[in-house]
Amino acid sequence: MMRAPAIAALILTTGCGAGLSQQGMPGPAPRVTPEVAAAWQELIASEDARIATAEQLETLRDALGSGSTLLRATAVRGLGRSERPELASMIIPLLRDPSDSVRAAAAHALGDVSRRSGAAAAREALLEALPEPGAGSTSAGAMAETLGRLAADADAARSVAARLTPFLAFDDVARLGVLRGFYFLARQSAAREAVASTAADALREVALDHPSAGRASSDPGSALRNTRERSLAVATLALVRAADAATLRAALDDPSPFVRREAVAAAGTLAVAAAGTLADAAAFRLIIERAESDRSSVVRYEALRMRAARLAETRGCEPVLAAVRDSSLHVSILAIDLLGSVCRAEAPATLLDSLAAVSAQTDSWHRAAHAVVALAAVNPVRAGVRGRDLAMHRSAFARTYAARAAAAAADTALLQQLARDPHPNVRTAATAGLAAVIGHAADTVYIAQLSSDESELLMAAAAALEGSTLPEAADRLLDALDRVSALRRETSRDGRVALLERIRELGSAALADRVRPYLTDFDPVIAERAAAVIDAWTGTRPAAAPVPLERLPVPTFAEAAGLAATAFVLEIEDGGEIEIRLLPFDAPTNAARFARLARTGYFDGLTVHRVVPNFVVQGGSPGANEYSGDGPFTRDELGVPNWRGTVGLSTRGRDTGDAQFFINLIDNVRLDHEYTVFGVVTRGMDIVDRLREGVVIRRVREQSAHSSAQPR
């Protein structure tokens, strides 16, 4: 595994704040005058409001000419986060700012406002401002990255690829940004041929430029940068179908398990390359077989996943059966899941039955829970016996799997029992199961779930009631909508949208007066949905006039500076600590919110409710699900990359942060510019890697960053 001093290194900030050192530690807050501190807070407030007034726009415009590098960078970033194309003309001059960090911030901001329109003008401005290779500037990498983000046809992609390719021969600070630019460009189907024909050879050289091939560095920051470069090069080659077998076999010798994992994922393109020749299929199979015995569970997991995805090319399920006994819980669980899906015909019911045995009190329920679900696909009768045992488990997470197994086995009696479970998540799974198995025969059960305030359960109940003929259904749905709306929680949006959709279907114009108050709801999405419901019933669409809730206050500069000197430590109930340092000058409102909630004990006793190996772990939900969080939304603060070890904000659409957070287990570059990163794990990444679904965060404590242990 990668040594922890490098885990959080090289976060590419927009240059607006302290950023991170080469050793992966957030730097101190910038020293500023009181006047600059006050101006900074005003800029953050204008950014958070998404420049709602002419005065706020003027505030940002004036700061572009400030003598303070911090204010210029913050202002141009605020313009970018508005995502308003008409502001591009204000941003472009900053591409030639005297400060490298301001030029980098301007490049990212130009990409943000040009993501939907204006790509051609933005591309022209970036190509003109882009320095020659070897200049050693962060802004060159930022400009290259943005060039890759802009929508491009084949001709534009060829021009960009030709301009960026020479940078790959230079080992300087810009190369990582250039590779990110190639990666984003390769995600566009129209650009792939241009990248493949122009840069494939150069990308292969980067992909294989690892210590075993002669490169070595005693600097952890430089070593990690090179690792990230190799990983991005392999991923980009895969996107453009230029990851040949020889390159991937060589990449499997890389010292980093994360580069090796990327090579395994890229091997999937071999099976479809060159019209799917037998040679390609054989090469793919050999790579997978080699990766399945890799010393890193990260690589073994990816190999097993790719085997399942290309089962025909890998000839059978025997390796899946062997992986059930893998020392890694994550690899073992994946193998069990596969025995109930793609390898169902070869899955021994006796093995699954033995794995499904579980004590109601044990914390080691994960293999058993997945085995019960897999067993339901192989031997439903036996799964019913094991499912009833699992339904008695003390963990609501385990009982949720019992409900899923019951649905797969069409065990109506157990589903009816679990639909009365004390925990909403269990009832959610049981409700969805009943809807799939017996449909409207359980309508009264679905109606009963409407007494909950949990959005996920309300969504399941509303979905199950589609097409219901119960006369009272619409009224009961409206009762639930009224009750949940009275809580005035922005994070109830998804549940309320589901209720309104079902009300529209099952109600009539006689209920229009009950819906009309929602035209002035605090959530503009709900107000518009209410107008659509009335329109569907009456043929006349009233005007929506939402009255938004008051925004959360933005932090002061002093508060942000204090957070830059603070660490928050997650104490995990089954052992270990995870230290997080916040990035209050890159994501000020979300860093401040996390700190405020941590200080009030909000996270204490909550769980890690989502674990997706080789992707993310997620926690911070009072309901232990995707839809339950702190009441008000926070806005996205995009810009910091989703490197491994960074802490991001879980959302369900733009500007819908609800205090749930995730930790990136790998470099999730595809999440960049879509999800906010507001912190970084500086100690305990080995604990993060071992987290299991349902593990409890005992408490979060705050301590001085100077007294915290160094990363290891």
Image (spheres, grey):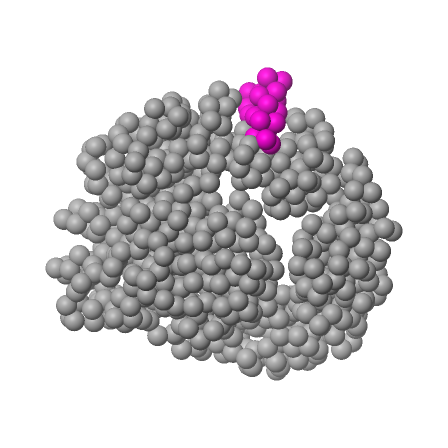
Q: Nearer the viewer, residue 301 or 481?
A: 301
The residue positioned farthest toward the right in the image shown: 381
Q: In the image, is 509 to the left or to the right of 265? A: right
- Residue 551 belongs to magenta span: no
Residue drawn at 36 percent across, 63 percent down: 567
Majority secondary structure of magenta residues = helix
Q: Nearer the viewer, residue 410 or 195?
A: 410
Q: In the image, is 41 to the left or to the right of 422? A: left
Q: In the image, is 206 to the left or to the right of 324? A: left
Q: Is residue 144 visible?
A: no
**Residue 8 in the image: above or below residue 536:** above
Q: In the image, is 196 to the left or to the right of 688? A: left
**Residue 588 in the image: above or below residue 489:** above
Residue drawn at 49 percent across, 28 percent down: 252
The residue positioned farthest toward the left in the image shown: 67
- Residue 277 belongs to magenta span: yes
Q: Which residues are magenta?
A: 269-293
Q: Nearer the viewer, residue 643 or 437?
A: 643
